Image: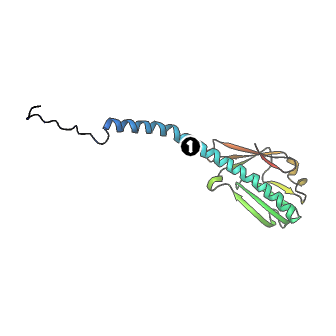
Amino acid sequence: MSEGHVRRPLQRRRGFTTVELLFVVLIGGVLATIAVPRYRQYVAQRHAMNARNVLVMSAARTRAAAVERGEPTIMMIRIYRDSVFVMSGAKTGSDEWADTLEVMGFNDGDISGDIILEDTPAPFILCYVPRGFVHPSCEDGKYLPVKVGFVAPSGSDTAWAVINAVGQVEPK
């Protein structure tokens, strides 16, 4: 080699080119376009399913309270308030019972949604007797089985439960 010509080591570039960055942003945008609507649909489905599961839990709570207390206990589904009431004791008024054991509203958090009663009057009242069954002559037991639906806030998804003739609530 001649003295005038010195080899320098190749310098490496650091960072990304604009084309590489644009390509990554484009791929991210396409993935977000696909993922966001599906995520929203998933969240809506979960809201409806959570509301249905709360109804199942409330029916189990009502049944257990009737057996434990040895007195009739009711579960009232009020669609105009989107809520379920569990009450026990003597009836003190047209809509009042001595003890309100639980009130579950469906307008907050992970259980938001609207309640639908299929071919049934509202509010719907189930009266569990101390043996743990729904008595047909007590309030609305004559309408059993009844289908109860929970519509997600988006209105696109509905989760259903069926209250059978003995008062068990089963997810469908």
Nearer to us in this view, 72 or 19: 19
Nearer to us in this view, 89 or 56: 56
Farthest residue, direction top: 1
Nearer to us in this view, 60 or 85: 60
Answer with left or right where residue 18 lies relative to residue 142. left
Local packing at callout 1 (Cα closer than 10 Å; few below 14, some 14-19, many 20+) is few
Is 100 drawn above or below residue 46 in the view shown?
Answer: below
Q: Tell me where residue 96 sits by quadrant.
A: bottom right
Give the residue displayed 69% in from the left and 51% down from the top. 51
Estimate the x, y position of residue 158 in percent, counting from the top left.
68, 43
**What is the quadrant of the N terminus in the image?**
top left
Estimate the x, y position of residue 53 in percent, counting from the top left.
72, 51
Give the residue displayed 40% in from the left and 38% down from the top. 24
Q: Which residue is mark 1?
A: 39
Q: Tell me where residue 70 sits by quadrant.
A: bottom right
Give the residue displayed 79% in from the left and 54% down from the top. 59
Answer with left or right where residue 99 lies relative to residue 111. right
**Coloring scheme used:** rainbow
- Helix, strand or loop at mark 1: helix
Farthest residue, direction front: 1
Give the residue displayed 13% in from the left and 36% down from the top. 6
Answer with left or right where residue 95 lies relative to residue 107. right
The amino acid sitting under disc 1 is Tyr
Count the numbered circles shown: 1
Estimate the x, y position of residue 148 in percent, counting from the top left.
76, 46
**What is the quadrant of the C terminus in the image?**
top right
Estimate the x, y position of residue 66 in percent, counting from the top left.
85, 61
